[in-house]
């Protein structure tokens, strides 16, 4: 069951032609797509911030040990 849900969110959701859906189904697919994109963007930006902080920490520790 979980494998089906993951497959749907990763592939099937994006291959659905929204124009052919009606009412609530069209709204649901659009909302789910929006949620997945937002979560992905949040995760990627969070990882970018974390990577940047690690770079600064490393640089500062190197500068501090040089003195």
Image: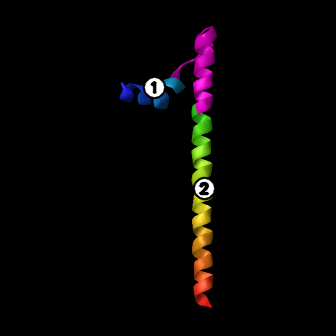
Give me the disc on residue 17: none
Q: Residue at x 47, y 24 (%)?
A: 12
The quarter of the rendered structure image containing the N terminus is: top left
Q: Position of residue 28 (x, y in %)?
A: 59, 18
Work out which residue is located at the far top of the displayed protein and give it: 22
The quarter of the displayed image where residue 22 is located? top right
How far apart are the alpha carbons under marks 2 and 1?
27 Å
Task: Identify the element where label 1 is drawn.
Answer: helix
Give me the disc on residue 8: 1
Q: Residue at x 57, y 46 (%)?
A: 43
Q: Position of residue 52 (x, y in %)?
A: 62, 63
Relative to 64, is 59 above or below?
Answer: above
The range drawn in magenta is: 15-35
Q: Residue at x 58, y 13 (%)?
A: 25
The quarter of the rendered structure image containing the C terminus is: bottom right
10 Å crowding of disc 1: few (<14), some (14-19), many (20+): few
Relative to 24, is 66 above or below?
Answer: below
Q: Are marks 2 and 1 in contact (CB under 8 Å)?
A: no
Q: Position of residue 51 (x, y in %)?
A: 57, 61
Q: Earlier in the sequence, mark 2 or mark 1?
A: 1
- Residue receiving disc 2: 48
């Amino acid at each position: 069951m979980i494998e089906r849900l993951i497959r749907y969110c990763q592939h099937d959701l994006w291959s659905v032609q929204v124009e052919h859906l009606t009412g609530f189904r069209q709204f649901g697919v659009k909302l789910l797509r929006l949620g997945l994109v937002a979560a992905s963007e949040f995760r990627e930006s969070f990882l970018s911030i974390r990577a940047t902080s690690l770079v600064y920490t490393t640089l500062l520790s190197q500068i501090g040990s040089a003195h």
